[in-house]
């Protein structure tokens, strides 16, 4: 007996045992299950007499092993027939004509043993773009659309004691894609973050499996829940029964809900050949009214508790079919407050913090447990929502992981702001119905959205709204458009200085949406990788300087929305001109931290006072690139990840660089009492500047913002927080008091006229000897400074007819006055006059005691002195100039660590201590395998890019799968920014 025959015989025995002991057990026909030998080949390369390949024994030695689920192109890549498309410009060199066409899939499998009366079903969960299915020469049907499901009774078609030949013709998607080819993966023909994928992701893209039932099958059982109050949960079951026989069947539908072992049963009759729905409701089964249920909550608001319901339908004492449903007891509701959209869960407004997924992976190679990893990383960043952009993630495992980790899903359909309908609106609508029915049991689904940045054209908008109302019973909101109608638009997608996100600038920047922070479904920045990741996909000859190869990975014209030129400019402006690619990557991580943290903190600064949610574009990487990610393609946690993780803490202390205010953001359901907030300022050498320290006791009310205090870095500025009056205010500027808030991050701007003015009321007559004006680029070319005692009669004390703007420190002859005025005479630009700060000083102005760059640390402790939240910032005396960081002395660190194994996971626990005389700034820690020098990735870490003052230490925990480091031999690379 050959080895192959022996294996197949053993498989048949296993299947027989499997089916004797269980009903409706799935047998996977995915390629990794070992039950079928899938091959793939282009239709035009196969013998024109296709009947031959539908017979057992057909020679497929010249076919390519197929990855199922997967794509045609992915199979050729896996077989080594194409160069790694991740590397360099390989993806752009592929001959598209080899894959932009139809392909045959072929495989053979053994017939499992069936007991008397059992039916065998062949199930397909998705073929892109459509697929024609044949078994043993018999055409079973056509699946039309990548979410169209197929379930075929093959009981009478299988070879009872032999091999079965399963053949699928996968039809190419076709061009153009948006929105003509929908339902499909719209970005497959390239976007500004992924390249064109040859074949347009055609293939058997979702699971294939066998299943069994008897006389009656259950179809799409659906559990709905209501939460009239937090102490009561209502459960309703709807299930369609399908009679697979020609005669009426009488059976018992039974369910067991756990936890709680809640049982119900009902006798149900169904006519021959019929399929119809039946309901099990609390009004008939009081046990479905659950007291004190374990509710499902989004991350941070409570535990994402899950229940299971085991369903059976029994006929004549035998189980005809069985299903297991996982669900959460929850109820969504929605509201608009001042035309700002809010999501509510179990009656509570949930402040949404999350990100967009463009794709799980640009070639659909993300499968199974990898989704758990990706979604867990989102949970670790303290997110509570993911937007499934244009519905490009279809795998059940994604939704399972979101259920598990308490991550709500904003789920789009497959349309993108193109003024055209799909070529087949009926297929589109059928797929939309299939999507809703497949996913509606998942508690994570929060919003169904019709179209990205547009309204679905007639008749689809009405159809989609009706589908949600009927097939999801309106339990979730249907949102026509992703960036309007209660939403504040989308964008921008490039980086800004941190103060920008706190100011009114974002309010005016929403693409298509309502001005405001509001609920923003897309906003982002370019996010460059670390050097270790950079060199994995960039050819060495293209490392430096920036070149066209960078654009192949979307750091150039292809990703213009990410403003890569601006990103490079800010690195140079903020941290100094990079000396090479390693220095560029190192400095980029600081920009990543600062801009991404500010993005979320800026929105939280206005939480419930306009702002109700924010989702970054994007939160995970589908292709090795330099834009729109938190962790990169290789799961390296970039600076953006750490900035987001810190900003989105459930109880969080934060500082606004726009107005110097310090606040507590509490996005939990619990009041947190007995807190102490402390602010400490350090100079660049680590010296603690006691003059600026602040401390206050506070309580943080649940799901709200608590104001603490303001940081004052100009203690002898007589204008600080004084009343200000201006002649006008530009619509995109802050109120006039922005010029006296002590921060270079906020600004007043006038209307676009020469004759505009602004004055400060010092509150009483004081001696004035110098005035500082901090201009934005839109400054006054000519202006006067005037003083007054009554704000009616003004005296000139200074005039400048050729101002260069920037920071002007103007000394005048000492004068007594209450009011100080800047009177504009002539603008330097087409805009109005724009001032960050208007400072007024007396004769004895103190000398600056803060170094050009200094550090701010904020700590929130409880009654026991334990840290509830801490936060760290670097600040400069000149907006955005951090180049003094490059002059810091080198830090000296000691590192101790140990490794342990628990539950197939390994944990490295390390202590990093600063034992030198310099500050250890932005310490980056990366574990490596000694065996091959590769990074230990993916890994979950509790912190990184942290700063240690002299004598301070940090406890780190690094968690990863045990299989990544079988020999336990590792090293830790621990490098502060100032040690390069």
Image (cartoon, grey):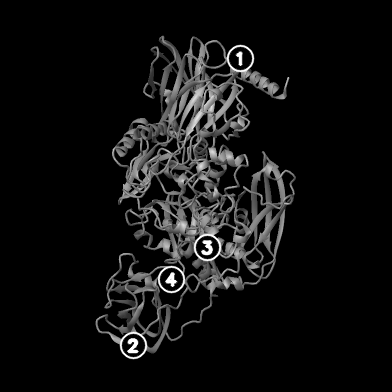
Q: Residue 837 carries which label?
A: none
User: Of circles 3 and 2, which is in front?
Assistant: 3
Neighbourhood count class around disc 3 (C-alpha, 10 Å): few under 14, some 14–19, many 20 upward? many
Q: Label 3 belongs to which residue?
A: 591
- Residue 335 at x, y percent in the picture: 33, 44
Q: Which mark is residue 797?
A: 2
Query: Mark 1 and mark 4 in contact (Cβ < 8 Å)?
Result: no
User: Of circles 2 and 1, which is in front?
Assistant: 1
Q: Label 4 belongs to which residue?
A: 744
Q: Where 52 falls versus 160 (above or below)?
A: below
User: Of circles 3 and 4, which is in front?
Assistant: 3
Mark 2 or mark 4, earlier in chain: 4
Mark 4 or mark 1, earlier in chain: 1
Q: How far apart are marks 4 and 1 (CA)?
A: 80 Å
Q: Label 1 belongs to which residue?
A: 161
Q: What element carries label 3?
A: helix
User: Of circles 4 and 1, which is in front?
Assistant: 1
- Residue 532 at x, y percent in the picture: 63, 56
């Amino acid at each position: 007996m050959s080895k192959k025959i022996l294996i197949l015989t053993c498989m048949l025995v296993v299947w027989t045992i499997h089916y004797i002991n269980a009903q409706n057990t799935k047998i996977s026909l995915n390629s990794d299950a070992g039950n079928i030998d899938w091959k793939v080949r282009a239709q035009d390369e196969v013998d024109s007499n296709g009947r031959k390949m539908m017979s057992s024994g057909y020679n497929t030695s010249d076919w390519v092993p197929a990855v199922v689920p997967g794509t045609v192109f992915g199979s050729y890549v896996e077989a080594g027939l194409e160069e790694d498309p991740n590397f360099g410009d390989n993806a752009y060199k592929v001959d598209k004509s080899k894959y932009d066409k139809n392909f045959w899939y072929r495989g053979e499998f053994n017939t499992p043993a069936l007991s008397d009366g059992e039916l065998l079903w062949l199930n397909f969960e998705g073929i892109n773009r459509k697929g024609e299915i044949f078994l043993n020469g018999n055409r079973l049907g056509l699946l039309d659309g990548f979410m169209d499901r197929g379930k075929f009774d093959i009981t009478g078609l299988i070879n009872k004691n032999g091999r079965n030949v399963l053949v699928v013709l996968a039809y190419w998607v076709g061009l153009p894609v948006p929105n003509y080819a929908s339902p499909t993966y719209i970005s497959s023909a390239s976007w500004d973050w992924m390249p064109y994928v040859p074949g347009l992701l055609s293939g058997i893209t979702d699971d294939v499996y066998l299943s069994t039932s008897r006389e009656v099958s259950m179809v799409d059982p659906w559990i709905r829940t209501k939460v009239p109050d937090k102490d009561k949960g209502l459960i309703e079951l709807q299930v369609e029964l399908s009679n697979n026989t020609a005669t009426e069947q009488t059976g018992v539908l039974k369910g067991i809900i756990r936890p709680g072992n809640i049982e119900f049963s009902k006798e149900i009759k169904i006519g021959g050949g019929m399929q119809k729905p039946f309901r099990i409701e609390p009004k008939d089964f009081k046990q479905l009214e659950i007291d004190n249920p374990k509710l499902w909550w989004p991350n941070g608001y409570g535990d994402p508790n899950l229940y299971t319901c085991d369903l059976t339908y029994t006929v004549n004492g035998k189980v005809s079919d069985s299903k297991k449903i996982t669900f959460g007891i929850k109820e969504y509701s929605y509201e608009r407050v001042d035309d700002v959209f809010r999501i509510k869960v179990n009656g509570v407004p949930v402040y949404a913090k999350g990100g967009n997924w463009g794709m799980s992976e640009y070639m659909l190679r993300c499968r199974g447990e990898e989704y758990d990893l990706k979604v867990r990383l989102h949970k670790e960043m303290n997110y509570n929502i993911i937007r499934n952009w244009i519905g490009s993630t279809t795998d059940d495992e994604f939704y399972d992981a979101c259920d598990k980790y308490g991550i709500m899903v904003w789920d789009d359909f497959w349309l993108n702001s193109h003024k055209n309908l799909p070529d087949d609106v009926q297929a589109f609508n059928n797929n939309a119905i299939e999507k809703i029915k497949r996913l509606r049991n998942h508690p994570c689904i929060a919003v169904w959205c019709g179209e990205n940045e547009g309204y679905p054209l007639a008749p689809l908008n009405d159809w989609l709204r009706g589908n949600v109302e009927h097939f999801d019973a309106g339990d979730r909101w249907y949102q026509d458009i992703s960036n309007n109608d209660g939403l504040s638009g989308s964008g921008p997608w490039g980086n800004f200085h941190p103060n920008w996100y706190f100011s009114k600038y974002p309010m005016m920047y929403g693409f298509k949406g309502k001005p405001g922070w509001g609920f923003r479904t897309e906003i982002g920045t370019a996010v460059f990788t670390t050097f270790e990741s950079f060199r994995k996909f960039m050819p060495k000859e293209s490392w430096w300087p920036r070149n066209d190869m960078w654009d192949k990975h979307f750091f150039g014209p292809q990703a213009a929305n990410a403003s890569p030129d601006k990103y490079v400019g800010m690195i140079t402006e903020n941290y100094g001109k990079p000396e090479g690619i390693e220095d560029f990557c190192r400095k980029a991580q600081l920009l990543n931290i600062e801009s991404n943290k500010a993005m979320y903190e800026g929105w939280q600064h206005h939480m419930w006072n306009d702002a109700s949610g924010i989702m970054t574009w994007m939160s995970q990487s589908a292709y090795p690139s330099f834009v729109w990610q938190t962790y990169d393609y290789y799961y390296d946690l970039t600076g953006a990840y750490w900035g987001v993780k810190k900003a989105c803490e459930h109880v969080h202390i934060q500082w606004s660089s726009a107005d110097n205010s310090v606040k507590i953001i509490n996005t939990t359901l619990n009041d947190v009492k007995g807190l102490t907030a402390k602010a400490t300022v350090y100079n660049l050498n680590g010296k603690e500047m006691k003059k600026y320290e602040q401390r206050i006791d506070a309580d943080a009310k649940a799901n709200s913002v608590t104001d603490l205090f303001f940081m004052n870095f100009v203690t002898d500025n007589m204008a600080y927080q004084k009343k200000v009056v201006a002649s006008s205010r530009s619509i995109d500027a802050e109120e006039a008091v922005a010029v006296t808030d002590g921060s270079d991050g906020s600004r007043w701007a006038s209307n676009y006229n020469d004759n505009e003015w602004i004055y400060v009321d010092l509150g009483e007559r004081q001696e004035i000897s110098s005035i500082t004006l901090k201009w934005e680029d839109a400054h006054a070319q000519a202006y006067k400074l005037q003083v007054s005692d009554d704000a009616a009669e003004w005296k000139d004390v200074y005039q400048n007819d050729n101002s260069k703007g920037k920071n002007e420190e103007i000394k005048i002859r000492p004068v007594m006055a209450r009011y100080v005025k800047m009177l504009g005479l002539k603008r330097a630009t087409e805009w109005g006059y724009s001032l960050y700060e208007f400072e007024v000083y007396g004769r004895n102005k103190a000398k600056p005691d803060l170094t050009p760059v200094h550090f701010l640390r904020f700590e929130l402790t409880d009654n026991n002195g334990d840290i509830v939240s801490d936060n760290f910032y670097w600040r400069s005396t000149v907006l955005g100039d951090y180049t003094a960081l490059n002059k810091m002395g080198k830090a000296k660190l000691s590192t101790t660590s140990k490794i342990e194994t628990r539950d197939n996971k390994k944990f490295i626990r390390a202590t990093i201590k600063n034992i030198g005389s310099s500050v250890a700034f932005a310490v980056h820690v990366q574990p490596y395998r000694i065996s091959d020098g590769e990074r230990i990735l993916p890994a979950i870490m509790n912190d990184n890019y942290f700063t240690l003052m002299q004598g301070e230490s940090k406890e780190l925990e690094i968690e990863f799968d045990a299989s990544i480091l079988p020999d336990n031999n590792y090293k830790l690379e621990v490098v502060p920014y100032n040690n390069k």
